[in-house]
Amino acid sequence: MLREFKKIGIDIKDIDLLIITHCHLDHCGGIVNLIKSGLNCPIIMSYETKYILNGFFSKNSNMQDLNLNDADYKLLNKINSMTLTDCLFDESVKGKRVLVKLIPSGHILGACGVYAEIGGFSVFYTGDFTVKDVETNSGLTIPDGMHADVLITEATFGYTSSFSVYDKTIQDKLILEVIEELANRGVGFIPAFAVGKAQDLLMLMKRNFEYMPYNVYVDGALSYITMLYEKVRGPIYGNGILNANDIKLYDSKREFIRKEISLGNCLVMTSSDNLTEGSTSFVYGRELMSFDNAILLNISNNIKKPISMLQENIPIINHGILQDILEVFLKLTPKKVYIVHRGAKTNSTFNIEEILNMFDDVDVMAP
């Protein structure tokens, strides 16, 4: 990341304002290196993002992707002292009025789109978003009358016709029916990303069942992240939703799986979502492959390698799909659009880039 700043001729020390849209590591994990390289400016993020980020930098988090050493943990106080969690920032920066508005953007807890206006010039940056509500955040809704000269939008699913289920009510009904059927048949195994989608699923179950009809075991990094979510959103564990790390009856994970999980009538939610070798999901998958009553539910479309287990697929998309991006564009009426964070270009004719290029006087760039 620091190399990219050098390429465009920006000195870290000259940055006047840093905005973090949400607490996925590909959007916030570089903050330590920025601070160590001389960043010394206000940092804006939502309260929820700040809270989860604090949890990442705790020595209890075991977030190996951060590659933190003991000295790095001491940076947390500095980051907190620089951080503002107000959704409206209206200040003078180097003699210019800077207006920043954070707008909830679905995706995960605390995620926000960013409207920024400097000297009458306006930019809207979506970050990762969806216009569809998720359990922990409202979908992105552009306020009436808001205009941006430039739109910078993610397009993770802007180049594909695989839209999954668009209506949340229908999606919720479908996912609840499927996971109940999986638990009734034995063990429903759900590899999930540690931050966001897993907690939304747990909260969906919590909201819909007064008494859970099956046990739900939560393991891997998402068990810790779920505890952080509880501090912001209220109880998630309990009533059949169990933190597997609290179960101390067994000498090993393998024994736990073979003696307790094997009994069936349960769900297992673990990280990572793509069964990365060495992850908790990989450990469970390796053991559950030998069970006749285990079925994998793929909710992320991120499992590339074949495994010897029955598999059901219900992609739950919490990114902006083509319709979402077009809706944001039509509300903001920008003259320039930058498409970033783009997924695989699987459809060369029907995609957001080609559609936006059909509008007159709109400059579309996909760097």
Image (spheres, rainbow, N blue to C red):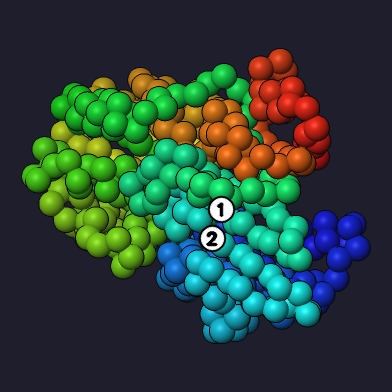
**Residue drawn 19% across and 30% down?**
180
Query: In the rendering, at what x and y percent does residue 243 appear?
Result: 26, 56
Locate residue 108 relative to residue 80 in the image: left or right. Answer: left
Marking on residue 113: 1
- Do the CB atoms of the residues marked 1 and 2 lie less than 8 Å apart? yes
**Residue drawn 71% across and 73% down?**
97
Q: Quadrant of the N terminus?
A: bottom right
Query: In the rendering, at what x and y percent does residue 343 appear?
Result: 65, 33
What amino acid type should be assigned to the residue bearing mark 2?
Leu
Q: Is the residue marked by circle 1 packed among few (<14), some (14-19), or many (20+) residues within 10 Å?
A: many
Q: Is residue 313 above or below residue 28?
A: above
Q: Is residue 353 above or below residue 155?
A: above
Q: Nearer the viewer, residue 96 or 268?
A: 96
Query: In the rendering, at what x and y percent does residue 313 appear?
Result: 40, 23
> Helix, strand, or loop for circle 2?
strand
Locate residue 227 relative to residue 262 in the image: left or right. Answer: right
**Residue drawn 76% across and 66% down?**
119
Residue 295 in which image quadrant:
top left
Marking on residue 102: 2
What amino acid type should be assigned to the residue bearing mark 1?
Gly
Residue 263 at least partly seen = no
Q: Is residue 344 above or below residue 334?
A: above
Across the whole image, how many numbered discs are drawn on residues?
A: 2
Q: Nearer the viewer, residue 121 or 201?
A: 121
